[in-house]
Image (cartoon, grey):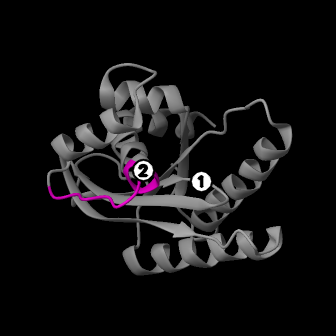
């Protein structure tokens, strides 16, 4: 059974780190899932200077996520899958930021699940093409103590909530590998 997943009866809430990767801003959100109960822990976004070179920006994302993983000790992580847009260069850069977002939890021994943007939106809003304002509103309903200061942080919380709702199937997929 993969590390990070608890079998049988839950002894304590599962701490989930949601990551919304981006080169300019990488959102992160931490929740605890205790059965059907979701508990807000923390959220924020890591911003990189646009004047920095690509390597320095990726390093800033790496170092920021490493601090978050070290401080909050998540049990599981969820990352939004990359969607391909019209600009191939932008997609490639997003993919590099996403690679860092997956590397940091993996290095800490945390199992990572990936979710398509449409599944995250459908899980949170009920439709696969929800707007950012709808996501923020529903995060306020689902996690009343959360007050994300950016869309990236709200999206990261949405990714964590999506994982909380779909983690049983993620456990089964990981066990089948």
> At x 16% / y 58%, what residue is drawn?
145
Residue annotated with mark 1: 21
Report if residue 23 lies within the magenta region: no
> At x 73% / y 69%, what residue is drawn?
58
Q: Earlier in the sequence, mark 1 or mark 2?
A: 1
- Contact, mark 1 vs mark 2 (Cβ under 8 Å): no
Image height of 6 relative to 174, above or below = below
Q: Which SS class for mark 2? A: helix
Please tell me in which quadrant of the rendered image residue 148 appears: bottom left
Does the rendering let one see residue 4?
no
Residue sticking out furthest to the front: 51
Residue 72 or 19: which is nearer the viewer? 19
Image height of 26 relative to 58, above or below = above
Quadrant the C terminus occupies: top right
Residue 130 or 167: which is nearer the viewer? 130
Q: Which SS class for mark 1? A: loop
Q: Mostly what secondary structure, the magenta segment?
A: loop
Q: CA distance from mark 1 to mark 2?
A: 12 Å
Number of numbered discs: 2
Residue numbers of the magenta segment: 145-154
Does the rendering let one see residue 96?
yes
The mark found on residue 151 in the picture is 2
Residue 136 or 101: which is nearer the viewer? 136
Please tell me in which quadrant of the rendered image residue 87 appears: top right
- How packed is label 1: few (under 14 Cα within 10 Å), some, or many (20 or more)? many
In the figure, is residue 14 to the left or right of 114?
left
> At x 48% / y 73%, what residue is drawn?
69
């Amino acid at each position: 059974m993969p590390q990070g997943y608890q079998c049988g009866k839950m002894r304590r809430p599962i701490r989930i780190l949601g990551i919304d990767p981006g080169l300019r801003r990488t959102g992160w959100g931490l929740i605890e899932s205790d059965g059907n109960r979701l508990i807000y822990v923390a959220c924020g976004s890591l911003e990189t200077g646009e004047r920095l070179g690509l390597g320095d920006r990726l390093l800033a994302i790496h170092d920021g996520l490493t601090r978050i993983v070290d401080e909050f000790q998540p049990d599981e992580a969820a990352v939004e899958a990359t969607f391909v847009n019209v600009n191939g260069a932008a997609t490639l850069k997003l993919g590099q930021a996403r690679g860092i977002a997956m590397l940091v939890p993996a290095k800490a021994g945390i199992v990572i699940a990936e979710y398509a943007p449409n599944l995250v939106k459908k899980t949170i809003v009920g439709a696969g093409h929800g707007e950012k304002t709808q996501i923020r509103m529903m995060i306020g309903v689902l996690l009343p103590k959360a007050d994300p200061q950016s869309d990236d942080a709200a999206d990261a919380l949405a990714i964590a909530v999506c994982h909380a709702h779909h983690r049983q199937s993620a456990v089964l997929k990981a066990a089948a590998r």
